[in-house]
Image (cartoon, helix red, strand yellow):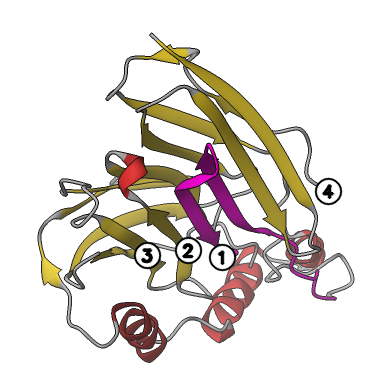
Amino acid sequence: MAAKPRVKVPKSAAAGDIITLKTLISHKMESGQRKDGDGNPIPRDIINKFTCTFNGKPVFSCDMDPAVSANPYFEFKAKITEAGTFTFTWVDDAGEVTEMTKDIALK
Amino acid sequence: MNTSKRQFLGRTLGVSAGMAITALLGSTRALASVEDVQKAIAEFTGGKAPAEGVVTLTTPEIAENGNSVPVSVSVESPMSEDDYVESVMILAEDNPSALVATFHFTPASGEAVASTRMRLARTQNVLAVAKMSNGDVYSATNNIKVTIGGCGG
């Protein structure tokens, strides 16, 4: 269900810098509150968990409820102490996992 | 978009009849109760009453579209190994389900700052409750006026 995510990470940063990360993923985030044309409830289908790790260590994560808008967007910070790889993971109600990685170098 | 209401309203004869029915539907829709909100906060904080301050919640005063309302939280903290912000819970008091999202930070976050976009059913208060690594709890509340609700009701 989830399409290719878009992630914005600086290519490089100086050690000790706090950088801003931005992520966006396409997902309809069906809330479970809506009804279809015949009045039947549309079942809930949302991404319920987003995680960001750096070299395997947790940086930021978010538990989502149906009140998060469609195509969930996140902006958050990370402190860079070494070069490495960010891993971004999205998990939806159906258990589908979308993963993306981005490298960052030291200046 | 809720097609059922559209189709239904399309079939009703007068605008006033449509409005009356909309009002009726609005009043019968299940909403998160005050107790639910209190319970969610108590579970999150472990029963501790949140203090004012430390948390900054940034939201628009007026949201024209309740389907996508930007929300940012920022919590003052050194974000060191033994003094950091563990998590921040966002709640919308008058949504069908009050919980919006819970952010989890670590010392590797550098700053306890995060933004996302949320749905709001109607004009209401939005709360941010922050839990620190030492167990302290802080909160902030903002009122947001919503022109068009975003829960498809």
Q: Secondary structure at mark 3?
A: strand
Which residues make up the magenta segment?
A: A40-67
Observer able to see residue B59? no
| Mark 2 → mark 3, Cα distance in angstroms | 8 Å
Observer able to see residue B122? yes
Query: Residue A87 placed where, x, y %?
Result: 60, 37
Q: Residue at x 53, y 43 (%)?
A: A52
Q: Are marks 2 and 3 on the same chain?
A: yes
Amino acid type assigned to the residue bearing label 1 in the image: Asp
The mark tally for this picture is: 4
Amino acid type assigned to the residue bearing label 4 in the image: Met
| The disc label shown at residue A65, or none | 1
Mark 3, residue position: B89
Q: Secondary structure at mark 4?
A: loop
Mark 2, residue position: B100
Q: Are marks 3 and 1 on the same chain?
A: no
Q: Residue at x 27, y 40 (%)?
A: B111
Query: Residue B10 placed where, x, y %?
Result: 79, 60
Identify the image quadrant of the C terminus of chain A: top left
Q: Nearer the viewer, residue B102 or A104?
A: A104
Q: Which subunit holds the residue at mark 2?
A: B
Left or right: B114 in relation to A72: left
Left or right: B36 in relation to A102: left
Question: Neighbour class for label 4 at 10 Å: few (<14), some, many (≥20)?
Answer: some
Mark 4, residue position: A1
Tags 2 and 1 in contact by the CB under 8 Å rule? yes
| The disc label shown at residue A93, or none | none
